[in-house]
Amino acid sequence: MDRSALDSLDKEALIRLILAQAEIIERLTKRVAELEAKLGLPTKTPDNSSTPPSKGQKPSAPAADKTAKTRKSHPGAHRPLHPNPTKTRDMLACACQHCGADVSGAAQRVCEAYDHIEIPPISPDVTRINLHGGICPSCAKKFKAAPPADMPNGSPFGDNLRALVLYLRFAQNIALERLSTLLSTLFGLDVSEGAIVEMLRASRTAFAAQREAIRARLLSGTVLQSDETGLRVGKANWYLWVFHHEDSAVFVAKPTRAQTVVSDFLGDVRPDYWVSDRYAGQMGWATKDHQVCLAHLIRDVQYAIDCGDDVLGPDLRRLLEEACGIGSRRADLSDATLKSYKYRLEARLDRLMARTPTRSAGVALAAMIKRTRRFLFVFLTNRELPPTNNGSERAIRPCVIFRKVTYCFRSGWGAELYADIRSVIETGRRRAIDALEAIRLTLAGKPLAPPVPS
């Protein structure tokens, strides 16, 4: 608005204009103050928030002090001999290395033994199947021999090769192009990326069936633990969920993070207890009680401390760390002792919550504790529950590595197959079955045997 426009306004119009501008200035001033306050907040890191460790900036290590005293050496170690060597060569001495005398007739014993390890040349075992046939002398129609049951017609790739491809792809995180090159270089086997994709596609039914068997065993228990992480499918953001406890783990890939994923997984089943972080989509499913992750909470408390809260944060962090310490030695404590510890922790928490924080971060922390305090110490009276959700994070960590190495998937069925295969691999690990053997059992339609109780 220029001067001529202002000259044309009467007194009332000028007053309204000035008041409107004053309101805008006041609103912008508040916004600037809010932004300046945020500039003064500490950076969120893996130590004071739920920021993944991969996004944390590690500090540079200090330069080595060349004047420092060198460390005292330790006794040397050597590779142990193989318990079952493929073959053994006994080398007898012919002449003495000192004087050259003939010692071939002297008594000799083993005075040194070592292993020489080598890999033989690897080549594919290719069996050509010739199906013979002819003209039936009885009905004059053409006949042909049936293919062998263990080598049916169709895909030329056998079960061991399929299992190896799935293992390299999903357990060792090898992308399709590099996997095709690896098979050609190491095994002398030309397999295109398209053929690898068809192997993966053909295995979907077997892994879906194994996943359902694992899910049934998991839901037959009384405790569930869960977590989720991001997943990229094509140009869309998906989420990979894990539900697990003890010897079973099921992964689910879905294009949403909503609680409908949990309801679809559970069906009509509701566990007695649940362990997770404080994400609302994972809360409220247990029929008896819920344990929230204290490790996540400790990091949030640390952020409040970093923001300047010295009223509630420091003592609350010590309280939560002490609770985790009790959980780590819970096996050596009686039920009565655990109940006593829970009573003392609750009493200390009551005294802490009676304080009035002066910083906004402390106020927010107090509100968060009020919302979740009934879920903090459930593990002290239920030995099946851990104090943290670290078990879920350990289960999901290989998936995060896979995401970073391979950039995830082009199709939804590929993501769902990966979730099923991770269910098999993680469950196999918990049942003392290595990943390759777990994949072989699944392709053969055999269950993953649960561990025998000791």
Image (cartoon, grey):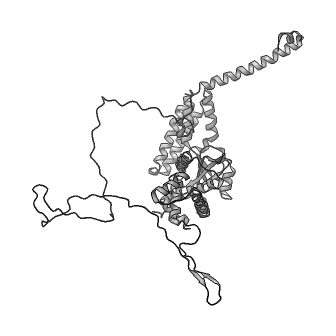
* Quadrant location, the C terminus: bottom left
Q: Is residue 141 above or below residue 6?
A: below
Q: Please provide percent x and percent y for residue 111.
A: 20, 59
Relative horizontal placement of residue 19, taking residue 45 as reference (left or right): right
The x, y position of residue 360, in whole percent, is 63, 28
**Is 80 inside the magenta-drawn segment?**
yes
Main secondary structure of the magenta stretch: loop
Up/down of 42 relative to 176, above or below = above
* Position of residue 171 measured from the top left corner of the image (x, y, whole percent): 51, 54
Query: Could you tell me which residue is drawn at 59 percent across and 64 percent down?
Result: 206
Name the spot of residue 406 as percent of width and height, x first: 56, 48
Q: Does the magenta segment cover residue 106?
A: no
Is residue 28 something one can see in this rendering?
yes
Please state if 37 lies on the left or on the right of 162 as rendered. right
Nearer the observer, 215 or 170:
170
**In the foreground, 438 or 408:** 408
Residue at the bottom extreme of this rendering: 138
In terms of image quadrants, where is residue 316? top right
- Looking at the image, is 372 positioned above or below residue 210? above
310 versus 134 height, above or below: above
Residue 446: in sight, yes or no?
no
Residue visible at 61% across and 38% down in the picture? 369
The answer to which of 187 and 437 lies nearer the viewer is 187
Magenta stretch in the rendered image:
76-100
Quarter residue 207 falls in: bottom right
On the rendered structure, is 246 left or right of 136?
left
For residue 2, which quarter of the picture?
top right
